[in-house]
Image (cartoon, rainbow, N blue to C red):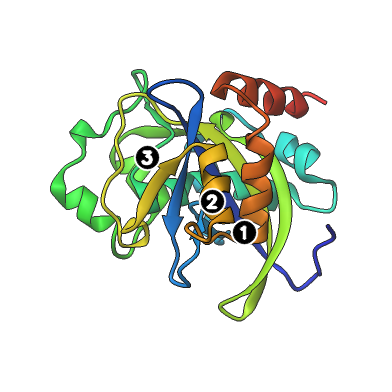
Amino acid sequence: MTAAASAVPASAVILLRSAESAGFEVFFTRGSGGAYRFPGGTVSREDCEPRLLQRCCGLTPEEARRILGAQLKPALAIGHWVAAARYLFEQTGFLLAAGEDSGDWTPEGLSAKQASSIQGSFSFEAFLKDNRLICDLGRLLYFSRWQTGPDGGARHDKRFFVVALPGGQKPVARDEAAEALWRAPDRALQLFTHQQLPIGFATYTTVRTLADFETIESVMKEYGRKRLE
């Protein structure tokens, strides 16, 4: 899939959690067009800026470029990862981060004022700085690339990333995720076949690929291995 030069860089996040019985489920949100999709959006200028990258760990710009392709500048390559982490937080409340002086971050310490600020004019860098947090990009594994659209008048050169649900976190109500749901890959495909789960081609193909895996661990092992190639 070759992206046109005019395509807008974008990222999407495939969020997985263990199912109650066996296997795993995938997180979907319903977009403005009515179709279910993965959290995500366009890469912003801030996503590629050094001051935000200084509050990230787990991946270097050079590593990101090696994974996504030499046609990208290192700052834009890692910007795809940053955008994925940012949209995951903005649209669902899940944050891939650790405290500067401690372990995994949990949302209990997030004040109502801080939570409401995410709905408006939101700076991811400022949020991380104010809360003494480091965004862990290493948890996001590169999954695939799609040219999607037109969506809102623009085509997107979209990179998909997969990540396991952060421990101890629950989704936060967001306008973008007003109709969010978890579904096992096989169940999602059944619902799509019966026209009960509208999803686009890229989303369908992604879910179909995930249906070949039995556990989250097997998914993460496969795409973690590809990072080393």
Q: Quadrant of residue 106?
A: top left
Q: How many marks?
A: 3
How far apart marks 1 and 2 lie (CA) works out to: 8 Å
Residue 91 is left or right of residue 43, and the answer is left
**Who is closer to the viewer here, 37 or 92?**
37
Q: Of callouts 3 and 1, which one flags the residue occurring earlier in the amino acid sequence?
A: 1
How far apart marks 2 and 3 lie (CA) works out to: 13 Å
- Going by the numbered disc 2, the residue's amino acid type is Ala
- Going by the numbered disc 3, the residue's amino acid type is Phe
Q: Which label is found at residue 10?
A: 1
Counting other residues with Cα less than 10 Å from the Cα at mark 2, is it few (<14), some (14-19), or many (20 or more)?
A: many
Residue located 48% across and 72% down the image: 33
Q: Of callouts 1 and 2, which one flags the residue occurring earlier in the amino acid sequence?
A: 1
Q: In this view of the protein, can residue 49 be seen by the observer?
A: no
Which quadrant of the figure contains the C terminus?
Answer: top right
**Who is closer to the viewer here, 219 or 115?**
219
Residue on which disc 2 sits: 83
Q: Secondary structure at mark 3?
A: loop
